[in-house]
Image (cartoon, grey):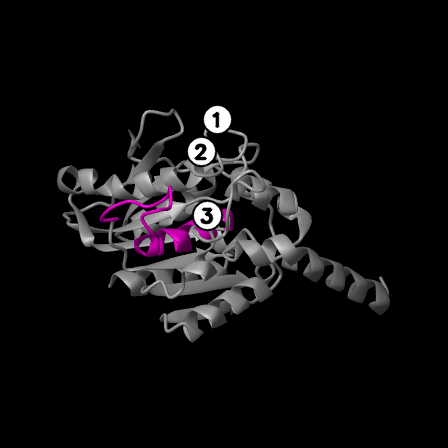
Amino acid sequence: MTAASIAALAASAAALAAAPISYLDLLSRERPTADLRIAYGADPLQFGELWLPKGKGPFPVVVLIHGGCWRADLPGLELMDYAAADLRAHGKAVWNIEYRRIGHAGGGYPGTFQDVAEGLDHLKRLAKPHDLDLSRVAVSGHSAGGHLAVWALARPRLGKTSSLHTEAPLALRGAVALAGIIDLEAYHATGPDACGGPGTIDALVGAPARAGDVYADTSPPRLLPLGGRQVIISGDLDPIVPSRFGQAYAAAAAASGDPSLEIELPRSGHFELIDPTAPAWSRVRAEIDALLD
């Protein structure tokens, strides 16, 4: 074999090694299982899975919110099983929530948002029987779930005229957004078509049927300052949510006075951020730990 051939093979192998994984790669692995599945509402999709660490509580809690473009035709909370198992193994209770999405009856506005809110607040009922420490709760979401995680942190900012307003929402230590589509308006305007283009954002926020400013109670930049710590993590190889979106949002949050940290992880695509076998995950878990410790 010539030196040129060897070099070409090495370059090919390096390219393959650097190629980001897909959600199919992630879900092809054997999946760990939660300890309990618990309904937080009457709809079959209003449930969460509770992952409880060994030992004696009270346990800090990580709420996980899956992505999938807010769409019913893509995978749901199973995408977060691997991250949930790793967090459980490191001493965190995990509440991994499902919710109605675009294409489900009741999904979109306001149902998707109301489900996330109800799922979070249901932790108040789970705390005593499962020895959960509600003074140490952080929320982390991936992709569309990253948007919903930061939105959850913004809930106290929602006015009483909004259909999404609730009294006394669960207090959160902060939010960790993983490749989050946080700024709905910006993604609608210049985002890739990976989630279905602007029509997906319209379906989520109720446009054009809903009157008024459809982003006022749905897109976190419109609610700044949120008053809580936000960690915005992106992968440098992410074609679905390029890191420029996270960088722009984190800058806006910081300018509003919110404590925010923006991180771009090298050699990481979209799904490496929820893959505990990827080098990126140790930094993700460290940032979640930092909110709870």
Residue to which mark 2 is pinned: 100
* Amino acid type, mark 1: Ala
Q: Are marks 2 and 1 in contact (CB under 8 Å)?
A: yes
* Amino acid type, mark 3: Gly
Q: Nearer the viewer, residue 126 or 257?
A: 257
Asked whether residue 161 is drawn in magenta, I would say yes
N-terminal of the two: label 2 or label 3? Answer: 2
Which residue range is magenta in the image?
Answer: 143-169
Label 1 – label 3 distance at C-alpha? 19 Å
* Amino acid type, mark 2: Arg
- The residue at 58%/59% (across/down) is 186
Residue to which mark 1 is pinned: 105
- Quadrant where the image shows the N terminus: bottom right
Give the secondary structure at mark 2.
loop
User: Can residue 239 be seen at all in this image of the molecule?
Assistant: no
Residue to which mark 3 is pinned: 145
* In this view, the mark in front (2 or 3): 2
N-terminal of the two: label 1 or label 3? Answer: 1
Above or below, 125 against 278 in this view is above
Label 2 environment density (alpha carbons within 10 Å; few <14, some 14–19, many ≥20): many
